[in-house]
Image: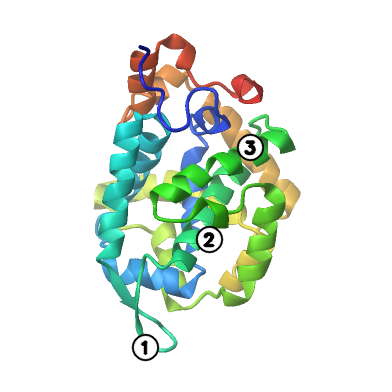
């Protein structure tokens, strides 16, 4: 019997796309977008210590994505069960009505999922990762699996670009940049750090945050009230950043924790190595 390839397998678009270094920029874009849903961001503000443990939160998210993408079926299902259990115990206060609600409401889980998956696909693809529309649709369909892991009914989750666009059109009237969203915006631009690391934050991290913000859809810029460069300029910057990061040898990049890709290759063999050209297979 061969080794367990996991929920997505090396034949998936997800396996190839999630190995791209622009996923980090995409993750920050997802945070910006997710914060525009008042009830979703209120759940984060009341139940998370992200302002004191920013790096830890980012690493936990990266670990979940890495586990569900490259881990065994058992480890992915276990990670999903853990997330569902945590969410089932959390509540927050509606910023408009004052009523308590569970953060695992399907409406909120769907928003977080769609904002995240849209960001991964949009940033990586716009930065130069070769993907046809058919492959992009396949990626979205694959992530009905990750939606199931967090507690959603896969049948209710957009499975292609047309459905995803229709979802965002439907939810837009509910979005806004209130105090919580602005707190997230300020935090992403100036996360707390050791005084000796402030220069690095200004030179490196702020550029990542600004690029992620610039890659948001125009309606998000309008809600936040901060302008962004023209779309063509943003695309050039995304492509330049993607080209630069992809010059770093993949084996070196994948040495960073939590090393899910290297463990998957050790489990499945060298043919499991993620690569853009494999997305069309």
The front one of 31 and 240 is: 31
Mark 1 is surrounded, within 10 Å at the Cα level, by few (under 14), some (14 to 19) or many (20 or more) other residues, namely few
- In the image, residue 142 lies at what x, y percent? 55, 39
Give the spatial CA distance, label 1 vs label 2: 23 Å
Say which residue appears at 44% left-offset and 10% top-offset: 270
Q: Which part of the image, by quadrant, shows the N terminus? A: top left
Q: Earlier in the sequence, mark 1 or mark 3?
A: 1
Give the farthest residue toward the bottom.
Answer: 97
Q: Is residue 277 above or below residue 33?
A: above
Residue identifier under label 1: 98
Q: Quadrant of residue 228?
A: bottom right
Circle 2: is it few (<14), some (14-19), or many (20+) Cα within 10 Å? many
Q: Look at discs 1 and 2 and give the one toward the viewer.
A: 1
Q: Which mark is residue 33?
A: 2
Callout 3: 10 Å neighbours few (<14), some, many (20+)?
some
**Proximity of marks 1 and 2: CB atoms separated by less than 8 Å:** no
Residue labelled with disc 3: 138
Q: Position of residue 181 (x, y in %)?
A: 46, 70
The kind of secondary structure element at disc 1 is loop
Q: Of marks 1 and 2, which one's residue comes earlier in the chain?
A: 2
Residue found 69% across the figure and 57% down from its top: 165
- Image quadrant holding the C terminus, namely top right
Q: Nearer the viewer, residue 61 or 177?
A: 61
Mark closer to the chain start, 2 or 3: 2
Q: Are marks 1 and 3 in contact (CB under 8 Å)?
A: no
Give the colour scheme shown: rainbow
Above or below, 74 relative to 107: above
């Amino acid at each position: 019997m061969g080794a367990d390839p996991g929920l997505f397998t090396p034949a998936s678009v997800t396996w190839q796309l999630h190995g791209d270094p622009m996923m980090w920029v995409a993750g920050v874009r997802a945070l910006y977008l997710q914060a525009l849903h008042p009830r979703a961001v209120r759940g984060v503000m009341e139940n998370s210590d992200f302002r004191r443990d920013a790096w830890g939160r980012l690493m936990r998210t990266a670990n979940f994505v890495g586990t569900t993408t490259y881990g065994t079926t058992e480890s992915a299902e276990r990670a999903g069960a853990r997330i569902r259990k945590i969410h089932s115990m959390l509540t927050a206060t509606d910023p408009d009505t004052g009523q308590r609600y569970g953060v695992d409401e399907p409406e909120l889980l769907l928003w977080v999922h769609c904002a995240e998956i849209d960001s991964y696909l949009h940033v990586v693809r716009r930065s130069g990762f070769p993907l046809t529309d058919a492959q992009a649709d396949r990626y979205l369909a694959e992530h009905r699996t990750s939606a199931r892991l967090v507690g959603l009914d896969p049948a209710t989750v957009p499975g292609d670009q047309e459905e995803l666009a229709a979802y965002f059109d439907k939810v837009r009237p509910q979005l806004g940049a209130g105090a919580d969203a602005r707190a997230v915006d300020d935090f992403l631009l100036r996360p707390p750090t050791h005084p000796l690391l402030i220069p690095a934050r200004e030179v490196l991290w702020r550029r990542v945050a600004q690029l992620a913000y610039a890659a948001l859809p125009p309606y998000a810029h309008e809600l936040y009230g901060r302008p962004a460069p023209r779309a063509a300029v943003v695309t050039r910057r995304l492509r330049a950043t993607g080209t630069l990061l992809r010059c770093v040898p993949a084996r070196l990049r994948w040495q960073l924790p939590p090393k899910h890709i290297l463990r998957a290759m050790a489990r499945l063999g060298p043919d499991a190595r993620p690569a853009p050209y494999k997305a069309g297979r």
